[in-house]
Image (tube, rainbow, N blue to C red):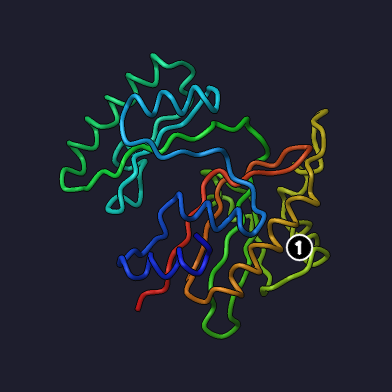
Amino acid sequence: MDCRKIITSSIAAGDAVIPELEAQQICRAYDIACPATVLAPGKAECIAAATSMGFPVVIKIFSRQIVHKSDVGGVVTGIATADELGRAYDRMLANIAKSAPGAEIGGVIVQKQMPKGVEVVVGGLRNDQFGPVVMFGMGGIYVEVFKDVSFRLAPLDKDEALRQVRETKVYKLLQGVRGDKPCDIDALCEVMVNTGKLLAEYPEIAELDFNPVFCYPDGCTVVDARLVLKSS
């Protein structure tokens, strides 16, 4: 399914946020790397998927009615074995039954857990006056605390993306500190450029949030992608 069809289908279904699996398809269409991900209808399929992709894995509840999965106990990380996965699966569904009893469950997402990297955020929004804008900064749970972010109009080229990265404090971490290898900043800038293209080409996307993006010495991966559609 191409990006246009995904967005059109999501709008027709009344989604405010494009479902995670489809959001990852859009990312990959724009050469934005995401972890291996499978939608499993039941526990046995979850275990088979995790065994195939390799542990450790993350599991997430899949429901169009549940946008913030962590808030209802719908995310379990760091699962290292098939036995752990079986127990985590049962525990997560029990949590959902209590905290979101009316939600329609479409299955469970099994995702390869990525090794820790330098956490950054790449986001975007649509300003009424200036149009699409790309945001970059320190990612993870501290993005709201430190507000270490910078903005550029989209689309932007790689040189402009690099200037944007250099404006932030997290740039020092990306260069490597205390013996850490420097991150692949060129690959990060490529993600920012492609994010700008995505925003510019699809005005139906009101905002997007790639947080965290794990940066490594040899590339970077968007661990969580959230694409919000414009309200009609």
Q: Quadrant of residue 228?
A: bottom left
Residue 167's x, y, as percent? 75, 59
Q: Pick whichever, 217 or 35, lies toward us.
A: 35
Side (left or right) of 133 relative to 204: right
Q: Nearer the viewer, residue 112 or 116?
A: 112
* Quadrant in the rendering for residue 201: bottom right
Element at label 1: helix
Amino acid type assigned to the residue bearing label 1 in the image: Ala
Residue 15 drawn at (x, y percent): 34, 63
The C terminus is located in which quarter?
bottom left
Q: Residue at x 55, y 58 (%)?
A: 26
Q: Is residue 93 above or below residue 136?
A: above
Note whether 180 is above or below 170 in the view shown.
above
Left or right of 98 on screen, residue 56: right
- Badge 1: few (under 14), some or many (20 or more) residues near its Cα, within 10 Å? many
Identify the residue shown where x is 71% and y is 48%: 170
Q: Residue at x 74, y 57 (%)?
A: 190
* Nearest to the observer: residue 196 or residue 180: 196
Instruction: Compare residues 52 and 87 and report the one nearer the observer.
Output: 52
Instruction: Where is residue 130? Give x, y as percent.
Output: 60, 82
Q: Residue at the location (46% across, 22% down)?
A: 79
User: Which residue is tagged 1?
Assistant: 161
Q: Give the left or right position of residue 214, taking residue 82 as reference.
A: right
